[in-house]
Image (cartoon, rainbow, N blue to C red):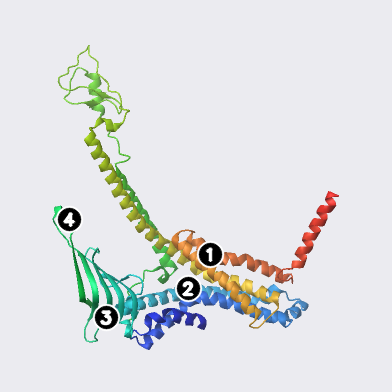
Amino acid sequence: MFIFIFQTIWLFIDDFAGKGLDIMIIGKFFFYMMPSLTEKVLPLTVLLASILTFGTFAENYEFAAMKASGISLQRSMLSLIIFMVLLGGVTFYFANNVIPASEQKIYNMRRNIAKVKPAAAIEKGVFSDFEGMSIKVDDKYGEKDRFLKNVIIHQKTDANVNSTVIKAKTGELISSEESELIQLVLRDGHYYRDVENKDNSTKRKYPFAKSDFDIYRMNIEVPEMDQDLEEENVSNREKMKNVSRLIKDMDSIEQDNKRIVTAFSKNIVQRMGAFAVLPKIDSSITNRAEEKPHVVPSTKEVIDENTVLDTTEGNSLNSNTEAKIAEPFTGDIMELFKDYQQGQIINAAKNSVSNIMTSVDGKKNELDKRYEIHRRHIFSLHDKYALALSCIILFFVGAPLGAIIRKGGIGLPMVIAILLFLAYYFIGVFAENYSYKGNIHPIVGAWVSSMIMLPLGVYLTQRATADRGMMSFGNGIDKIKRLFIKKAKSEE
């Protein structure tokens, strides 16, 4: 646990050191991080403890004494198996109740620190959203990281559109305990802003304003400078939810995704004009035309979907005159229009397709994020069960492995335990990332590391029960030799 805590301190010390935070706040943050580290610490602890314990038993010939007394390996492991099952239940309760609460504490504390301490909200090398603008800096230095280097600011309008760009070589954050405003002083930079114009005729000219400045001052309002850093405002992330809430939210997210996809597909179909429903034929008009062929209506009447009764004004039909049936048009529809009309139709079609493709691309990005949220919920749900089961599986890997290698202490068992845990951990990390992106199913991603260790545990338990070593290369070579000898004899 201490190793992982120091790793956490190493990862987050740059975000908290020099920000004027109280030592109690930093201590609470790392205290809230401890339950989250259980997912990494507990499997390694079970694996290492089982290898060391049973390795010490085998090294001191205690297993030999047990076998001489008629006690098998499974019987000697029975009490520990019951303990591991209970530990798995406690682990599931911990993952379902304690870890979500700690995740909620951690996330909200970091969020509140970023609000109160603006320097903590500005990260180096990436755009950080802050108070209606996006800020990017190449470097932060000085007392409390108040000095900024190579500042780029995108200011947003009420419609969340980037209309103003400010670039400066240096910047400085100036704050006061008595004021709720923080002043951002930019030096030696450029200012660019799109000019909004309501006149449609001048909108296409894309007017803008540009200027250079030596010093540019911006006042940033930071609300609730004395707010509680432990205030919890966000609780909708997947790691902050227990099993019942995850199941409920998974169903609602899935239904929302289906509704959005259905509505968008109907909208696109309507915009394309595809699959248009043909108008129904009025049977009364058809029957009237068949019963009274001498009546001349003022317009063309539809007989069926492929024929048209030509009864234009000025043409009278009598008993000796038959109705002319028009043949369906099978040529190029563009030939029905003039040349300039053909160009207009083609341009309109291109613009329509371009607009539709833009809408599809934008909706695709939105749906990708929504589907990723759904996959994260599925993974988080199954990961709680997989964590509890992994303790039992890794026990069945470590206990027989310790009995096989017959070595206790912190030497070879420690190395083997760390190697096995690293394989287990990295498989889980890669599977988690792949499942988030949709490359593999989230259920597979949550269980794959445990399912890989399960056959290994079964194999090692069988070998340890039969009092065999890990593997015997000599026996393998002898089998290969016997195979070639049998083949040679059969050829003779």
Q: Position of residue 439 (x, y in %)?
A: 48, 58
Between the residue at mark 3 and the residue at mark 4, the CA separation in whole angstroms equals 37 Å
Q: Quadrant of residue 335?
A: top left
Mark 4 crowd level (few <14, some 14–19, many ≥20, 10 Å Cα): few
Q: CA distance from mark 4 to mark 2?
A: 56 Å
In the image, what residue type sits under mark 2? Ala
- Dot 4 corresponds to which residue? 203
| Residue at 78% in and 78% down | 68
| Between discs 1 and 2, the one toward the N terminus | 2
CA–CA distance in space, label 1 to label 2: 15 Å
Comes first in the chain, label 3 or label 2: 2
- 4 or 1: tag closer to the N-terminus: 4
For disc 2, the marked residue is 95
Q: CA distance from mark 1 to mark 3?
A: 48 Å
Amino acid under disc 4: Lys
- In space, the residues marked 4 and 1 are separated at their CA atoms by 56 Å
Q: Dot 3, how many residues are within 10 Å of its Cα: few (below 14), some (14-19), or many (20+)?
A: some
Residue, disc 3: 173
Q: Secondary structure at mark 2?
A: helix
Compared with residue 303, is residue 250 higher up or lower down, i.e. above or below? below
Question: Element under label 4?
Answer: helix
Q: Nearer the viewer, residue 48 or 410?
A: 410
